[in-house]
Image: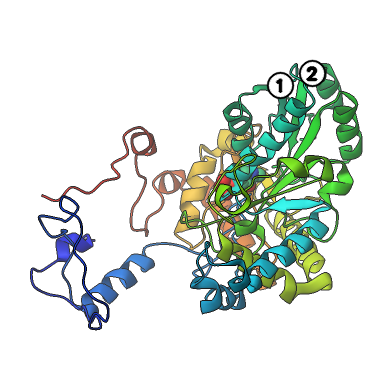
Amino acid sequence: MKLIFEKSVPGRGCGLLPACDVEAVSLPAGLEREVPPALPEMSETDVSRHYTELCQHVHGVNCGFYPLGSCTMKYNPRIDEEMAALPGFTAVHPLAPADATIGCREVLDTAKRYLCEITGMDDMTFQPAAGAHGEFTGVLLIKQYHDARGDSKRRKIIVPDSAHGTNPATAAMCGYEVVNIASAPNGCVDLEALKAVLGDDTAGLMLTNPNTVGIFDDNILEITRLVHKAGGLCYYDGANLNAVMGVVRPGDMGFDCIHMNLHKTFATPHGGGGPGSGAVGCKAHLAPYLPKSALLDGGDGIQVRGFFGNFLVVVRALTYVMTLGREGVPEAARNAVLNANYLMAKIRGAFAPAFDRPCMHEFVLDLGQFKKETGVSALDVAKSLIDYGMHPPTMYFPLIVHEALMLEPTETESKETLDWAGEVFHKLADLAREDPEFMHNAPHNAQIGRPDEVRAARNPVLRYRKA
Ligand SMILES: *Cc1c(COP(=O)(O)O)cnc(C)c1O
C-alpha cells in the first residue's frame, strides 16, 4: 500500500481549525520556518480510509487469538480506556499546583497501595516507562543499597539461562558482571549451580517465577534464602504477573524488589511500542533509594523519567484492579493457568511440550524431534498459523529449548477459541507430514510472506525519504 505522503495532493485538506482566540505572537528571529513543513494533504475521507486500511494490515487482540508467550496479549476491558480518557486525567499538567491535582495523586497512592498488596512489597515507583526500564531501576536500588553500606565487593548479578534477555542486559547496563547459571533439567534453578556461584561478591539474583518455561519453582524459598545468606538481594522479574496475581506474592517468596509490566498484566494495550509502565515495588529496606523527581521532590537520589511516569497507564491498572476486586484478581490468574493447561493438553498429541508437567500461565513446545522427522521447523509452524488468523506464539525463546514455541493463551480466551486453536495445531502437524514444502513457504494469505529478518535487523530502513 502507498504511504500517506505518496497519496498527498497539493492543496487538498480537511483542516477545520477554530479561529484563533488569543493574540498572535511572532517567534524570535531564527526560530521561524522558512519553508512550510512537508505534511500530506488529503481529504478527510482519504485519511480515514488510509488508517482503516493500515489497521486491517495488523493483528491485534481484538482481531483474533494472540498466544504470544511472555507477552500477555489479553483483552483489555473498555472501562479501563474510558477511565484513562477522562479529561480530569488527560488534561492535567504535571506542574499544576498540588491542590489542583489531589485526585491524580489519590489515583497514584491507591494504585500503589493495591499493587504493593498484590506483590507483597512496601513501597513503589511508577516512573519507569516499561519492563526493561523497571529492571534497570530495580537493579539500581540494589546497587545503591550495597553502596550505602560501603559493600563495594559485590560486583556480580546471577541470572539463570532461562531468563528474559532484558535481565542480563539490565545487569550489564548497571555496571555489573553477569553470572549465568544453567537451569536444572526440569527448567528450574539448579540449586547446586546457584550455591557454586554465590559469594561475598554477589550483588543479587534476577529471577522470573513462574519462569519463562511456565513452571513455578518449588525451591523458591530456598533460593531466596541462599542469596540472602550470601549477602545478596533478590530481584523478581514480574513483567508477567498473570499466573500469580492475588494468589502468591513475590514479597512472601523472599524477593526484595520487583517490577511489573502494568501494560501486560494490568490492562494497557501494548505491542505497538506505546506508553507502558514498569512499576517497581520494593521492601522497606530499599524504599529510601526509589527514584524521585528532581522538579517535584528536589534533586536527591536517582530519577529515571520525568514527573510521575506514564500516569494514564496507572489509571488503567487501578481501574482494572478495582473492577476485578479481591475475588476477581486471583480468579483471573487461576483462569490464565487453567487455559494454558487446557490448551497444552489439546496440543500435546500434535506437538510435544518441552516440560511435560502442569504449567502455569504459559507453556513451551519443543519441535526438535518433530523437525528431525518432518523437516518442518518451529518457524514454519509459526508462519503457517498466520494463514489461520492466529498470531504466532513466541518463537525460539527461551533459549534453553531449541525449536521452541511458547504459548500464553491468557484468561480472556473462551473454551471455543482454545478448542479451535488446538485443532489448528493438529491440522498443521498432519500437513507437515503430507506437504512440508507448503509449510516452508507459509504464510500464503498474508500481506507479506517471509521478510529477510537478518537484513531487516542489520540494515533497518526506518526513515522515509521523499523523492
Ligand atoms: C516483556 C518482558 C520484559 C520486558 O518488558 P518491556 O516492557 O518489553 O521492556 C522483561 N521480562 C519478561 C519476563 C518479560 O516477559
Amino acid identity at mark 1: Lys
Q: Are marks 1 and 2 in contact (CB under 8 Å)?
A: yes
Specify few, some or many for label 2: CA neighbours under 10 Å numbering under 14, 14-19, or 20 or more: some
Rendered view: 442 above or below 182: below
Q: How is the image coloured?
A: rainbow
Q: Quadrant of residue 194?
A: top right
111 sits to left or right of 406: right
The disc, 1 or 2, on the residue closer to the chain's N-terminal end is: 1
Residue 366 in sight: no
Question: How far is the residue under mark 1 from the one under mark 2?
Answer: 9 Å
Residue 213 location (% of width, % of height): 71, 42
User: Residue, x 62% and y 57% (percent of image)?
Assistant: 264
Residue 293 location (% of width, % of height): 59, 49
Residue 203 location (% of width, % of height): 75, 25
User: Residue, x 55% and y 56% (percent of image)?
Assistant: 276
Ligand 1 closer than 8 Å to label 2 CB: no
Specify few, some or many for label 1: CA neighbours under 10 Å numbering under 14, 14-19, or 20 or more: many
Mark 2 highlights which residue? 197
Residue 23 in sight: yes
User: Residue, x 91% and y 34% (percent of image)?
Assistant: 222
For the residue pair 464 and 294, the one nearer the viewer reads as 294
User: Residue, x 73% and y 69% (percent of image)?
Assistant: 321
For the residue pair 89 and 329, the one nearer the viewer reads as 89
- Residue extending furthest left? 10
Tag 2 secondary structure: helix
Mark 1 highlights which residue? 156
Disc 1 versus disc 2: nearer the observer: 1
Amino acid identity at mark 2: Val
Tag 1 secondary structure: strand
366 sits to left or right of 218: left
For the residue pair 331 and 186, the one nearer the viewer reads as 331
Residue 33 location (% of width, % of height): 15, 55
